[in-house]
Amino acid sequence: MNSSNLMVLTNTKLLKMGDLNVTKLKTKKDRANYIHHLLNDIKALDLMIDKGMIEKDVFRIGAEQEFCLVNDQFLPESKSLEILKDIDDEHFTTEISNFNLEINLDVLELGNTCFSQLHKQLEMLLEKAKKAASKKGVKIVLTGILPSLSINNANVKSMTNVERYSVLNDAIKGIRRQNFDIHIKGVDELNLLHDSVMLEGCNTSFQMHLQLSPKTFVDNYNWAQAISGPVLSACTNSPMLFGKELWRETRIALFTQSVDTRANSYLLNEKQSRVSFGSRWHTGSITDIFKDNISRFRSFITTDFIKDSVDMLNNNEVPGLKALGLHNGTVYPWNRVCYGRTNGKPNLRIENRYIPAGPTITDEIANMAFWVGVMLGKPKKYNNIHKQWDFKDIKMNFFNAARYGMATQFFWNGSYISSYDLILNELLPMAYKGLYSAGVSPQDAESYLRVIKNRIQAHSGSEWLIRNYRRLLKHHKRYEAMQVLTSKMYEKQEKGYPVSTWGRLFGENDFPFIKPKVVKHIMSSDIFSVDKKDSVELVLNIMKWKNIHHMPVINGDRELIGLISWNDVKSYLEKTKRLDDSVNKIMKTDVITTEEYVPVEEAKRIMDNHKIGSLPVIKNKKLLGLITRNDFNG
């Protein structure tokens, strides 16, 4: 989910902040000029609303498709700029990660066969991308988080070589002034410090836009917030990151933390994250939503301004509200209000940012039809929902859906209800009503909403990924299982059938594409280690209990400082019989090591040449894993 997502609705496409020459705000003069234009844009928007200039009684849809690039090993491939050049189509643009690209689909008026039209255009554009990518030995994968990603893919070396991304990275780091502290706890736990915003580039989404009338916009925005949890629960497709099983939609936690400008401190931090669900219902005017974001979040980038938006209105011109759009593009609520122009007319829309990419195009268009249908099919009893429901209940619903997907129990209309029952018995009928009321053809409504119904009765993308990943881990080490899972997901996507029809994997032991194997494919990362101050007696018992013959010795920074083998312990005890001695008495400090991307054959030669039975795997002196001779037989 690219941090540069400023969308301006036009008659042909959705343009991004990437089309602007952005720079970091540095001088007092630059800041004053930017704030002047920003506040004038708010005045101009108020004037357009008061004068009835904002387009009404017209519904339009649009979408952005982010996708991943992988090589023949199904690992991320950083060739986005080369492929983009060969595609040569203005619908495509870059992402912050060089192994991602994005398609901006045409804006369509809601009605008739708009969803199948969008489907056909997306298929056509992706096919164009596939042809260009195949010439570079690259494949395209639709997924919320690529299963085969590793932490090495999230460093600045993987950043797309476009100036605005480095400007963004420097600006956010400058505000934060410390590393990003990422902590996501699910079935597994991810806990790491990171030095750039590049973890944000691990997210890929299918962002959906719905243009609405200004008259009921604020109430409809609140409704969009209320339905976010249930809609998300049916659409999750990002359950893993770096081989760890986290939330059913891990993007929600990852994106929030990866661009968080709030610094950690000893004080209770009450500030809101730039990526946020919000903290309250909106009850004022449309511009109050923008004003709230301006009040909470300071701008850190700017661009060139030529015309004053209020002056443009006085000259009967429709302004683009460039400063407001630029600020809006650096604040990331999961439901974001956007201003745009279509055929010269100003309009307002909601951008749904929480839906992941994939598992197939059919699934994505079905997600969109479901969301749009529920938005427009709202019963009258849910009008002014801010007066009926507590905001914290719908916020809790959203994060529970991100954590648990279809297993979520929602607090809905005063009582608890399962995701299955809520969607099947209330939201799907509501979606049919909403689509029919907007003039969507029965064929489009039925075909896409049936995809949602089949999915909740079978399994989501997240469920398919997790169940099959667990199966693969019975036969493969983590890194290899991540690649195999990605390859199988790609095969299923290419067939085009919705995820509800995907069966479990078979023949998971034969994957000739993984070659040559590297140390990371065979190493054990869940290893027992000891401190140099631990007693020999403790080491002896751990080795007996766990039936292990080699134990790394690490310090408090997880740096490898020594190695102990069963033979070391045995020979030492035969000489001294002192169990209360510490590990530093017997550990070897001249340890032969290797790195995770060294070919397996080379690691085997190292062990043979040095006549050793184990080989610690390190990165920047820190212990990552361990391989023994038994690992070569896997």
Image (spheres, grey):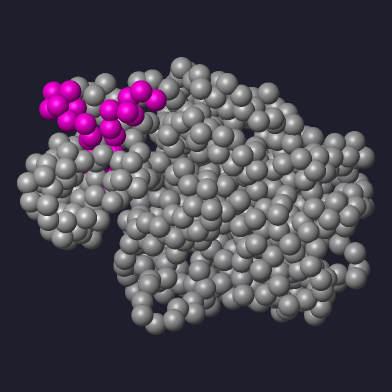
Q: Is residue 457 left or right of residue 253?
A: right
Residue 525 placement (x, y as % from top left): 35, 43
Residue 252 on image: x %, y %: 56, 57
Residue 81 pos. (x, y %): 43, 33
Q: Residue furthest left?
A: 575
Image quarter of the C terminus: top left
Locate residue 498: give its quadrant: top right
Q: Is residue 630 magenta?
A: yes
Q: Nearer the viewer, residue 391 or 470?
A: 470
Residue under the image location 88 percent in, 39 percent down: 446
Of residues 46 and 273, which is closer to you in this image? 273
- Look at the image and say whether residue 312 sits in the magenta stretch: no
Against 230, is 118 above or below? above
Work out whether 536 lies above or below 614: below
State the residue at coordinates (52%, 48%): 245
Return the residue nearer the eye: 407 or 332.
407
Span of residues in magenta: 607-634
Would you say 71 lies left or right of 11 here? left
Please report the residue visible at 35 percent of the width from the left and 39 percent of the height from the top.
524
Residue at image x 52%, y 73%?
Answer: 272
Query: Up-down: is 424 above or below 525?
Result: below
Going by the picture, which residue comes out furthest to the bottom? 267
Does residue 329 show up?
Answer: no
Q: Position of residue 589 (x, y in %)?
A: 10, 46
Residue 556: name its quadrant.
Answer: bottom left
Residue 46, relative to residue 554: is it above or below? below
Whether residue 540 is visible: yes
Instruction: Tell how many labels.
Output: 0
